[in-house]
Image (cartoon, rainbow, N blue to C red):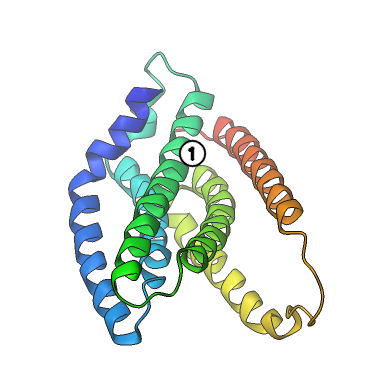
Amino acid sequence: MTGLILKDFYALRNYLYKQLALMAIIFLGIGLVFKSCSILPIMLMMLMVMTAMSSFNVDESAKWDGYALTLPVTREQIVGAKYLFSVGILLITGAITTLLAILFDALTFHEGALSIAAGAACVALVYLVILCVILPLYFKFGAEKARLLSTLAFLIPFFATFFLLPYMQVPEGVSIPWVAVCIGAFGLTVLIVTLSYWVSTVLYKGREF
């Protein structure tokens, strides 16, 4: 399975390096204008979700799936490698850029490490859930057909958050059990990823190449 993960990384590494460098410069500039470092990990994690989807385009253009099924690997391993690659680059990028944002913030705007880390963690969870919705679509329909559906998967959470935000304010004086909330969020995320992987495996087994 390691080889399958490295295949995606090698196919996209030049794109990854160039895009990460370009976007980091752009959003650092935006951060200087708005005097905030928290935007850097948020936007670069979004770039990683888009990169994960690009790996399906590369596979489709190279007719990879038909070739992969002649190799001594199972469909479960192919799906699992794609999940590990997609989730891995999201979380690794999020962790590294969050640390960089905290270090840069300590030298400049002093928003606070906790504020930046909490915001990045919440956004990482949202992107992770979006990935779990998008990946089964790509395994079922392929890159071209799933592109429109994946766009909707991005837009629906955005607009839902926008409209629901006014009703999500915590009343003054109410104490939130943050430890329990974090444990619950982690457990729910693990459940969603597991369910998504299972659905993708079932869908991929039903496809013919």
- Looking at the image, is 98 positioned above or below residue 62? below
Q: Quadrant of residue 108?
A: bottom left
From what the image shows, is residue 69 above or below residue 63? above
Q: In which quarter of the image is residue 98?
A: bottom left
- Mark 1 burial class by Cα count in 10 Å: few <14, some 14-19, many 20+: many
Residue ID for mark 1: 83
Q: At 49% across and 20% down in the image, what residue appears?
A: 74
Up-down: is 94 above or below 46? Answer: above
Q: Answer left or right for 130 relative to 98.
A: right
Residue 93 spot, x, y in % from top left = 37, 51
Q: Which residue is drawn at 64% across and 37% down?
A: 194
Q: Which of 31 and 44 is in front in this view?
A: 31
Closer to us: 11 or 13: 13
Quarter containing the N terminus: top left
In the depicted view, which residue is nearer to us: 53 or 104? 104
Image point (43%, 18%), residue name:
73
Q: Type of residue at label 1?
A: Tyr
How many marks can you see?
1
Q: Is residue 63 visible?
A: no
> Which residue is outermost to the top?
72
What is the secondary structure assignment of the residue under circle 1? helix
Does 53 sit above or below residue 166? above
In percent of width and height, residue 202 lies at: 63, 33
Residue 188 location (% of width, % of height): 71, 48
Q: Which residue is drawn at 35% across and 78% down?
A: 109
Which of the image's four quarters has the C terminus?
top left
- Asked if one can make out residue 43 in the rendered structure from this viewpoint, the answer is yes
For the residue pair 32 and 79, the one nearer the viewer reads as 32
